[in-house]
Image (spheres, rainbow, N blue to C red):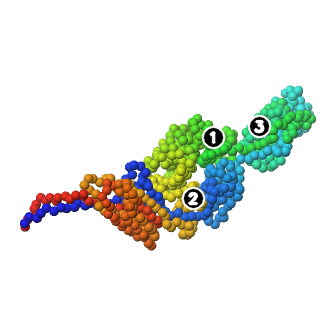
């Protein structure tokens, strides 16, 4: 007997278990998703919902936050500091700042607050001003030449020849021109009985005395003197301007003053009405007009963008093409030029456009414009060097997107998200829609566990997450109008409250207060079936997933770009459990899947059963015979 030929259906099964991230481009594959929220790559190659966040406390009116040995928040006009040490009390400074957006940077134990030019000390909880301004305001100010010890002198005699029989310690002013005895070219001398000779007493400093003058300044500060009538009085034309404070007391300070002028050897007393000059012997007087009030200021530049590098604070602003660096280890002095390695530094750049951001990475202080990167490096002012590179810089309004993560600097540029590792910036947002990353109103960056968080505000807001180790993007629901990283935690602010991105890293990690439970999630895959050949179709699709807790999942499908149709659902109860969700799709060229629900799930894979579109004869070399 000869058996008839029979038809065999050659079905095949394909298992997809390595999932990519968010891909908003035309080339999104079935292993990626074209849209979705609250999925992450933390369990790669599986696709899991993000870690639940924890609500720490209510917080409104946030103008900036920074972490340094604790979390500093600036809310409205108040400054609140919460130390990392749970036993230490929080510090609140009401009405310490103005109400407006702040730029914050840390150096040592201090957090600097710009544009208010204040410093919060994390060690003692104090708020102090970086700059200082003293004005006479009706007080009299005395200017007198003095020696290196700050001592002033009075003489009883002057002339071209010294006295014949002087006493020990006697002072005498030896003059060059008898008609102008108080001129700078005269010489103050003191007689020494031990040596039997006259020795010159150089008066190369000026002692400035006024009530309360020295309380605002410290030794080696650089102060700007204005309004002094010394030049008009013929005492010294260079007293107005930047001066180094060589010594200071409660009511006086000593600055450098090179002998100059027709009336150098004398004392000038200036008040609101006039200035009176008196010669060193007290016998000659002169009166000059005092048009201005005397003021002394330790200046701090206006800075929009600040960063710390090599124990200096660096900054720039959007209104001038100047980069400023403070004195070494001293953010209160920005104009100190003594010719030493600890001097302040300033340089004007030649590139066009306004500065858009500043950061530190790889030992460099970096200053960005939209199309330029300025890199400043060196160990002291004498060997500081500035190099400029035309490249994709920081976008306007995106200064806060700058974030250093794993020795790489990430930021938002006009062309997308960039990564800079010391050479040239490279684009890492090729999988995202470039149009949705342009013309932003604000951009804020943060980091946690190798993931770069980027909050973008346009017409709406988005929170994008880039896994730097796997090179994959994802998106989470917006809870990040502002954020700051501590190295072990990421704090986010949603406009109403402060959140911790990973509750297990908090000191009271065992507490479940404020921890999210039902996390809403959604995912839309790329087109499934585009890799199929002719005469084959998708006959069955099974989703394999784990539910971490009580969760609900709804699976919908769109055939060939049509409307969404619900094909499966799941309501998981209790602890973790694995589930299979199978369904039979209808004939189509391609389809997309949408997963929507609440809770915590992990998509471990999906199995596709592929069947031929028509039968196939099974031919054998030998025939069955009876």
Secondary structure found at label 3: loop
Q: Which residue position holds label 2?
A: 494
Mark 2: give few (<14), some (14-19) or many (20+) Cα within 10 Å: some
Measuring from the top left, give residue 499's x and y in whole percent. 56, 61
* Residue 237 at x, y percent in the picture: 78, 33
Check the image and report above or below for 314 versus 44: above
Q: Nearer the viewer, residue 201 or 468?
A: 468
For marks 1 and 3, give the CA distance: 27 Å
Q: Residue at x 64, y 53 (%)?
A: 111
| Marks 3 and 2 in Cβ contact (< 8 Å) | no
Instruction: Please tell me which of labels 2 and 1 falls first in the chain.
Output: 1
What is the x, y in percent for residue 490?
55, 58
Mark 3, residue position: 240
Q: Is residue 470 above or below residue 384?
A: below
> Is residue 615 among what the camera can see?
yes
- Name the residue located 52 percent from the left edge and 66 percent from the top edge: 516
Quadrant where the C terminus lies? bottom left
Of circles 3 and 2, which is in front? Answer: 2
């Amino acid at each position: 007997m000869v058996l008839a030929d029979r038809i065999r259906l050659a079905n095949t099964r394909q298992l997809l278990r390595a999932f990519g991230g968010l891909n908003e481009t035309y080339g999104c594959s079935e292993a990626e998703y074209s849209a979705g929220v609250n999925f992450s790559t933390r369990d790669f190659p599986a696709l899991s919902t993000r870690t639940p966040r924890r609500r720490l406390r209510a917080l409104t009116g946030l103008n900036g936050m920074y972490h340094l040995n604790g979390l500093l928040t600036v809310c409205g006009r108040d400054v609140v500091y919460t130390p990392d040490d749970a036993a230490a009390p929080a510090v609140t400074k009401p009405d310490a700042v103005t109400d407006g957006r702040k730029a914050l940077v840390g150096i040592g134990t201090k957090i600097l607050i710009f544009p208010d030019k204040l410093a919060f000390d994390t060690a003692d909880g104090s708020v102090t001003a970086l700059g200082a301004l003293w004005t006479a305001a009706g007080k009299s100010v005395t200017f007198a030449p003095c020696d290196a010890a700050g001592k002033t002198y009075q003489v009883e005699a002057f002339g071209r020849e010294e006295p014949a029989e002087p006493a020990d310690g006697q002072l005498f002013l030896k003059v060059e021109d008898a008609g102008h005895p108080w001129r700078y070219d005269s010489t103050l001398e003191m007689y020494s009985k031990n040596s039997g000779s006259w020795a010159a007493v150089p008066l190369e400093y000026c002692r400035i005395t006024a009530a309360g003058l020295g309380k605002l300044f410290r030794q080696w500060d650089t102060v700007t003197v204005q309004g002094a009538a010394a030049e008009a009085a013929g005492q010294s034309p260079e007293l107005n301007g930047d001066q180094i404070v060589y010594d200071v007391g409660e009511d006086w300070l000593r600055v450098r003053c090179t002998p100059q002028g027709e009336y150098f050897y004398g004392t000038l007393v200036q008040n609101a009405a006039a200035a009176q000059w008196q010669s060193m012997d007290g016998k000659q007087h002169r009166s000059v007009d005092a048009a201005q009030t005397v003021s002394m200021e330790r200046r701090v530049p206006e800075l929009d963008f600040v960063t710390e590098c090599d124990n200096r604070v660096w900054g720039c602003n959007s209104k001038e093409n100047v980069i400023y660096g403070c004195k070494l280890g001293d953010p209160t002095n920005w104009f100190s030029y003594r010719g030493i390695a600890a001097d302040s530094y300033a340089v004007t750049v030649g590139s066009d456009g306004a500065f858009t951001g500043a950061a530190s990475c790889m030992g460099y202080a970096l200053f960005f414009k939209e199309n330029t990167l300025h890199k400043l490096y060196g160990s002291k002012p004498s060997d500081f060097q500035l190099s400029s590179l035309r490249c994709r810089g920081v976008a306007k309004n995106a200064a806060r997107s700058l974030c250093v993560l794993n020795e790489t600097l990430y930021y938002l540029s006009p062309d997308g998200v960039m990564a800079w590792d010391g050479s040239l910036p490279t684009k890492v947002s090729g999988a995202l829609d470039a149009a949705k990353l342009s013309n932003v109103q604000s951009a804020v960056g943060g980091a946690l566990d190798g993931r770069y968080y980027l909050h973008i505000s346009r017409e709406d807001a988005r929170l994008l997450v880039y896994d730097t180790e796997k090179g994959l993007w994802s998106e989470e629901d917006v809870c990040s109008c502002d954020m700051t990283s501590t190295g072990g935690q990421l704090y986010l602010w949603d406009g109403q409250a402060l959140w911790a991105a990973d509750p297990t890293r908090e000191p009271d990690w065992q507490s479940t207060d404020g921890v999210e439970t039902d996390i809403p999630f959604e995912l839309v895959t790329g087109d499934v079936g585009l890799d199929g050949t002719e005469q084959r179709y998708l006959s069955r699709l099974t989703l394999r997933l784990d539910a971490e807790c009580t969760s609900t999942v709804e699976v919908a499908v769109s055939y060939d770009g049509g409307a969404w149709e619900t094909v499966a659902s799941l309501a998981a109860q209790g602890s973790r459990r694995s589930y299979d969700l199978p369904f039979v799709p209808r004939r189509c060229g391609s389809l997309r899947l949408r997963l929507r629900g609440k809770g915590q799930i992990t998509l471990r894979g999906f199995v596709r059963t592929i069947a031929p579109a028509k039968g196939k004869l099974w031919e054998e070399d030998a025939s069955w015979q009876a």
